[in-house]
C-alpha cells in the first residue's frame, strides 16, 4: 500500500506550482456517480464516479455513507499478469485533472451494505483541501452508466 501512496503523491506534485491559483476548496465537480449493488449472496457494493478538479491539487481521502459502515477507496493493479484490488490511502486529484473511478481502476467499496437497484445513496467525499462534497448516487446494474467490462464479483473475498 505504501508504494501506491507515493506514486499518487508524485502525480499530484506535477500540477501547478502553489500560489498560482486561488480556487482551493472550490474546484471539484462530481459527475456520473452510481453504485453497483452486491452480487447475489454477497454484501459488497461498488461506487463509481468522475471527479473533475478545477481547483488546486487535492486528494480524495475518504468516503462515508449511511449505506455502509465501512467504505474503502480501492484501485486495481496488474501484478504478474493478474488484476488485483488494493486499498489506497487516497486518490490524487491534480489541478485540472479528470479522474474517473471505474471498473478496473479506482473505485469505492461499500462493505456490508444492503443497497438494491433503484436506491439513491448519499455519499460524502472527504478531500484533503476542498470542503466535503455530497453526491446522490443511484444504484444501477453492473455495466450501466460506465460501459465497463471489469467484473467486481471477486470482491467478497476481502
Ligand atoms: Cu475493490
Image (tube, helix red, strand yellow):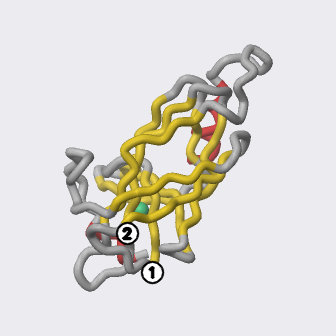
Q: Quadrant of the N terminus?
A: bottom right
- Compare residues 59 and 25 and report the one nearer the observer: 25
Classify mark 1: helix, strand or loop.
loop
Residue on which disc 2 sits: 45
- Compare residues 47 and 33 and report the one nearer the observer: 33
x and y percent of residue 24 in the render?
72, 30
Q: Which mark is residue 71?
A: none
Q: Residues within 10 Å of mark 2 (few under 14, many from 20)?
A: many
Tags 2 and 1 in contact by the CB under 8 Å rule?
no
Q: Which mark is residue 112?
A: 1
Q: Residues within 10 Å of mark 1 (few under 14, many from 20)?
A: some
Q: Is residue 2 visible?
A: no
Outermost residue, bottom direction? 41
- Ligand 1, seen in the image, is in the quarter at bottom left
Classify mark 2: helix, strand or loop.
strand
Q: Residue at x 22, y 62 (%)?
A: 141
Amino acid at each position: 500500500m505504501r508504494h501506491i501512496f507515493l506514486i499518487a503523491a508524485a502525480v499530484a506534485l506535477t500540477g501547478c506550482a502553489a500560489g498560482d491559483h486561488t480556487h482551493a476548496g472550490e474546484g471539484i465537480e462530481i459527475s456520473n456517480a452510481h453504485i453497483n449493488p452486491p452480487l447475489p449472496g454477497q454484501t459488497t457494493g461498488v461506487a463509481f464516479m468522475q471527479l473533475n478538479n478545477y481547483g488546486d491539487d487535492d486528494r480524495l481521502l475518504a468516503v462515508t455513507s449511511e449505506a455502509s459502515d465501512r467504505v474503502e477507496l480501492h484501485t486495481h493493479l496488474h501484478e504478474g499478469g493478474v488484476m488485483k484490488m488494493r486499498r489506497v490511502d487516497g486518490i490524487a486529484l491534480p489541478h485540472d485533472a479528470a479522474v474517473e473511478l471505474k471498473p478496473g481502476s479506482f473505485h469505492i467499496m461499500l462493505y456490508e451494505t444492503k443497497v438494491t437497484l433503484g436506491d439513491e445513496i448519499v455519499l460524502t467525499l472527504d478531500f484533503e483541501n476542498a470542503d466535503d462534497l455530497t453526491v446522490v448516487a443511484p444504484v444501477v446494474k453492473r455495466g450501466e452508466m460506465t460501459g465497463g467490462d471489469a467484473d467486481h464479483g471477486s470482491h467478497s473475498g476481502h
